[in-house]
């Protein structure tokens, strides 16, 4: 078998070949793993994607394949029997699962590995976490990050409907999450709440590990336009858990977000939605080469308009992919190839958090790409693309999720723009900074009587606070 030819079972792949993949970022081991992922997608994950989209069933067999490939704990150190994967390998794997297999499974994998990052970040010296990491691949233990809040929307790091209290047996954790991938199907959950002894500062956060009997999932309520199989339904938590199931220590949640959760999430957002865009290009290529117009004796691929539309979409996709792979390579360079072992000796180390702005940009680029390219390739496929048999309509529906997944593209772009224009200190993550320009502008609209009324109200509020 010629390694230069991308295979799909016993046949050459119907989509774009390796000539259009940035393979120079990948090691020989990365490429060998990619071939294994493509094989698993061809045998199990892609057929199940079609079936689960129709039925809404959770793709457990696909999750088992991820365990067989040793992807579920792939970022954990070799000392736990894991791959110790680089950021580049994580990006490649996420893109490959979405492109060749199933976007729903790619999001399941993404939210799982993000949660694994939270565990690995503070695994050292915690037997409960270390044991879970050692068993994760062999037992195919899928997890998920339950962070979103029903009241704060795309600002997922702002958990208003949560709390944690110290009790004699450990921690009493309460949490309501709006969207939790693998809800009711996960073998373990990572969640974030306000810290014990919370005093109103929403940057004071803590992270906890829970198991299914401590979490009420609602998988039967998941009914969405796309991503039918990932079961991103609400969860409710009201449980007392042991002392060693806090991940890190009280107040460590914001650092966990910056250094573990966000870097992996943004990287995998890019991989998942770049992968969806490439899947659309692959399916459209197959259609354009097979379908033609008998009256003209030409295939769809033979028209200059098709070539222009396809070429434009591919160029845009490659730009987003190269941005993501460039970021992954930079993160590898900053972490000795993606190591997580540094935090055992230096809990305050923060090489990954330096890439937050780049990660937000990668998410915006990939989610926007998937939305636009899926539409264009649906148009290229014409009427047949509108039917389920053509697969592109499923990808169009799945592609739309990336834009609104937290942090939404609107939230992400606003953060990037404010950061770039006004500096990082202007990004008000925790809604604590007064916009004095806006405040003075609004005060200027008040007449003397209205200003006096406001003074009286504020004076009464201050007097009440002093009582």
Image: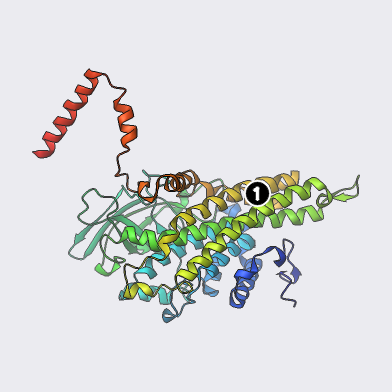
Q: Who is closer to the viewer here, 458 or 183? A: 458
View extreme (left): residue: 467
- Helix, strand or loop for disc 1: helix
Residue pictured at 60% horizontal, 60% vertical: 322
The answer to which image quadrant residue 11 occupies is bottom right
Above or below, 418 against 168 in this view is above
Q: Who is closer to the viewer here, 102 or 54? A: 102
Residue 395 percent location from the top left of the image? 63, 52
Residue 184 percent location from the top left of the image? 43, 58
Residue pictured at 37% horizontal, 52% vertical: 157
Left or right for 423, reference 250: right
Above or below, 436 against 313 in this view is above
Residue 58 appears in view: no
Count of numbered tags: 1
The answer to which image quadrant residue 188 occupies is bottom left
Q: Quadrant of the N terminus?
A: bottom right
Residue 243 appears in view: yes
Residue 83 percent location from the top left of the image? 49, 77
Residue pictured at 36% horizontal, 46% vertical: 426
Residue 118 percent location from the top left of the image? 38, 65
Q: Which residue is mark 1?
A: 373
Badge 1: how crowded within 10 Å, few (<14), some, or many (20+)? Answer: many
Q: Quadrant of the C terminus?
A: top left
Left or right for 62, reference 127: right
Colour scheme of the picture: rainbow
The answer to which image quadrant residue 80 occupies is bottom left
Left or right for 40, reference 359: right
């Amino acid at each position: 078998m010629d390694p230069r030819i991308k295979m799909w079972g016993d046949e050459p792949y119907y989509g774009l070949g390796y000539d259009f993949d940035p393979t120079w970022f990948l090691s020989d081991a990365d490429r060998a793993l990619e071939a294994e992922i493509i094989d698993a997608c061809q045998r199990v994950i892609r057929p199940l994607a079609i079936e689960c989209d129709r039925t809404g069933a959770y793709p457990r067999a696909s999750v088992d394949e991820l365990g067989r490939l040793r992807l579920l704990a792939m970022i954990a150190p070799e000392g736990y029997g894991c791959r110790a994967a680089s950021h580049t390998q994580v990006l490649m794997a996420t893109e490959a699962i979405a492109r060749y297999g199933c976007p729903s499974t790619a999001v399941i994998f993404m939210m799982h590995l993000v949660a694994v990052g939270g565990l690995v970040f503070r695994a050292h010296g915690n037997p409960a976490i270390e044991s879970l990491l050692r068993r994760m691949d062999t037992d195919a233990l899928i997890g998920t990050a339950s962070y979103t809040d029903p009241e704060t929307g795309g600002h997922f790091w702002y958990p208003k409907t949560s709390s944690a209290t110290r009790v004699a047996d450990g921690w009493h954790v309460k949490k309501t999450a709006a969207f939790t991938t693998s809800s009711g199907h996960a073998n373990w959950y990572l969640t974030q709440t306000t810290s014990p002894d919370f005093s109103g500062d929403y940057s004071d956060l803590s992270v906890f590990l829970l198991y299914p009997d401590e979490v009420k999932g609602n998988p039967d309520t998941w009914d969405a336009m796309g991503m039918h199989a990932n079961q991103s339904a609400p969860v409710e938590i009201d449980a007392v858990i042991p002392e060693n199931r806090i991940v890190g220590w009280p107040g460590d949640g914001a650092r966990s977000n910056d250094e573990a959760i966000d870097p992996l999430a943004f990287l995998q957002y890019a991989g998942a939605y770049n992968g969806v865009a490439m899947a659309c290009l692959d399916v459209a290529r197959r259609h354009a080469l097979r379908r033609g117009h008998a009256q003209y004796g030409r295939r769809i691929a033979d028209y200059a308009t098709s070539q222009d539309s396809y070429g434009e979409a591919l160029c845009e996709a490659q730009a987003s992919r190269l941005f993501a792979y460039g970021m992954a390579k930079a993160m590898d360079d900053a972490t000795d190839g993606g190591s997580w072992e540094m935090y055992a000796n230096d809990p305050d180390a923060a090489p990954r958090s330096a890439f937050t702005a780049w990660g937000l940009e990668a998410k915006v680029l990939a989610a926007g790409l998937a939305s636009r390219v899926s539409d264009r390739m649906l148009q290229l496929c014409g009427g047949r693309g509108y039917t389920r048999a053509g697969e592109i309509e499923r990808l169009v529906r799945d592609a739309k999720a990336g834009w609104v997944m937290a942090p939404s593209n609107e939230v992400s772009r606003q953060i990037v723009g404010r950061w770039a224009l006004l500096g990082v200190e202007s990004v008000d993550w925790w809604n604590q900074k007064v916009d004095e320009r806006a405040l003075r502008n609004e005060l200027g609209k008040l007449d003397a009587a209205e200003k006096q009324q406001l003074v009286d109200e504020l004076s009464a509020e201050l007097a009440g606070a002093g009582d």
